[in-house]
Image (cartoon, coloured by chain):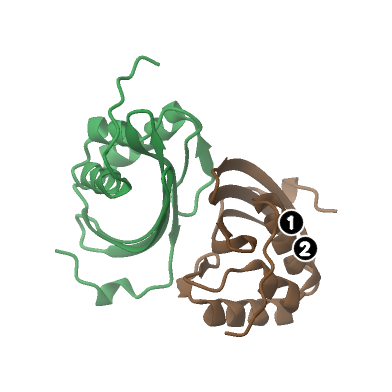
Chain colours: A green, B brown
Amino acid sequence: MNRTVSGFATSDEAEQAFYNAFSMCDQNAMSAVWADDKVVCIHPGSNAIYGYESVMRSWTHILNNAQLPRILFNTVKKTVNESLAVHLVEEHIASGQGAVVVILATNIYQQLENGWLMIEHHGSVTQSHAETHTVQ
Amino acid sequence: MNRTVSGFATSDEAEQAFYNAFSMCDQNAMSAVWADDKVVCIHPGSNAIYGYESVMRSWTHILNNAQLPRILFNTVKKTVNESLAVHLVEEHIASGQGAVVVILATNIYQQLENGWLMIEHHGSVTQSHAETHTVQ
């Protein structure tokens, strides 16, 4: 793969970039968030998708079909050492139709040669009453 | 909390102990797998449960109501450094009635003072066709 990867200074910056890319339906930005090797993505209710190319295809499908979702994310727990970061994130995602879903995501970032990049995103639906949340 | 915690030599041993405890519906063994501080558990389709006492209550409820489930687990991806381990696990769980559910779990272990212990378990249901799997 001839991708020039410039990682992020911190896992927080990588996380912000991930949700910016998702919110803006920006495939190029999404591509830049993920590491090349041995990545895995589990969309809510779905099977695991392994490998950079397959994970990117899944995001292309999602981002091409999303209508600039409004996303509030709250990183509720972080465990970070010098080369691995585990973030637990509560995502409130509002679609164009106004429905809000609440997703819990475990996001894993790794410090690689050029900085921090995402290596795993594991999302799952919750029983939260989404209508009680406000998404700006 | 006056719990004497003896961690495990590796994250693999902690993981084996977690699934042994689950399979045997052994609450004491389950209690010994988890770290004391800042743990979080997300059962499939559920909200996050924070803190050792609350996580243990959730497992007590599950283990008291399970009928010695037959569990096959397959650790499909591991990322480990000196103090954090991220395991992605495919769980095939067969209940007493014979139904099999396939769960994807991201299990996080941390190397603490006395060894490796679980700090996060994030499970989610998949679209897998469970009937094609054989659980012994």
Q: Mark 2 points at which residue?
A: B20
Disc 2 with disc 1 on a shared chain = yes
Image side of residue A60 versus residue B42, left or right: left
Q: Which amino acid is tagged 2?
A: Asn
Q: Residue at x 59, y 48 (%)?
A: B87
Q: Which residue is drawn at 43% across and 72% down?
A: A127
Chain bearing tag 1 is B
One can see residue B12 in this view: yes
Vertical order, A119 against A57 (above or below): below
Q: Residue A23 carries which label?
A: none
One can see residue B99 in this view: no
Vertical order, B33 against A3 (above or below): below
Separation of disc 2 and disc 1 at Cα?
6 Å
Q: Percent position (x, y) of residue A16?
A: 24, 48
Q: Which residue is drawn at 29% across and 43% down?
A: A14
Q: Which residue lies furthest to the front in this view?
A: B113
Q: Residue at x 18, y 47 (%)?
A: A68
Q: In which quarter of the image is residue B61?
A: bottom right
Chain bearing tag 2 is B
Q: Mark 1 points at which residue?
A: B16
Secondary structure under the numbered disc 1 in the rendered image? helix
Residue contact between numbered discs 2 and 1, judged by CB atoms under 8 Å: yes
Q: Nearer the viewer, residue A52 or B34?
A: B34
Vertical order, A22 against A7 (above or below): below
Q: Which of A11 and A58 is in front in this view?
A: A11
Image side of residue A114 versus residue B131, left or right: left
Q: Which amino acid is tagged 1?
A: Gln
Q: How busy is the neighbourhood of tag 2: few (under 14 within 10 Å), some, or many (20 plus)?
A: some
Q: Percent position (x, y) of residue A65?
A: 28, 41
Q: Percent position (x, y) of residue B113?
A: 59, 63
